[in-house]
Image (spheres, rainbow, N blue to C red):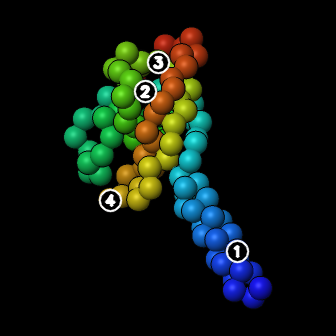
Amino acid sequence: MSFKLLIRSLFLSLLILILLVSCGSSGNTTAEGRIEILGVTTFNYGTHGLYDNLDVLLYALKSDLNLDDYAGLWVTVKGDLIDGYPRNGGPEYINVYSVEYQGIIISP
């Protein structure tokens, strides 16, 4: 009886650990700003940046979507924060899976 209880407890602990690891510390995030193509940066990650209305870089972005289509546009992006960032003084890094145009065109 005691051995069965031990096995059940170990199984339950393992299941909880797997769920916690799969959730991770990253996860979904939503942000709003202007997308611009990143040139050469000191932090060396991301193809695009998301900037606020004061031209402050909020996030570095990467995506399977064509973010060039949204350059200069005010958008809402949804994606997953990438673990291990920021690096080298750069911003947080989002793997974008959704972009919604907000109807505002802003020149940098």
Which quarter of the picture shows residue 41? top left
The residue wearing badge 3 is 73
Tell me which label, 2 or 1, sits earlier in the chain: 1
Circle 3: residue type: Leu
* In the image: residue 85, left or right of residue 52: left
- Mark 4 surroundings within 10 Å by alpha-carbon count, few (fewer than 14), some (14 through 19), many (20 or more): few
Q: Secondary structure at mark 3?
A: strand
Residue that mark 4 sits on: 88
Quarter of the figure with residue 10: bottom right
Residue 34, position as x, y percentages in the image: 47, 26
Can you tell which mark lies on residue 8? Answer: 1
Structural distance between the alpha carbons of marks 2 and 3: 6 Å
**Dots 4 and 3: beta carbons under 8 Å?**
no
Are circles 4 and 1 on residues that touch, CB within 8 Å?
no
Q: How much space separates mark 4 and mark 3, taking CA atoms?
A: 27 Å
| 73 lies above or below 6 | above
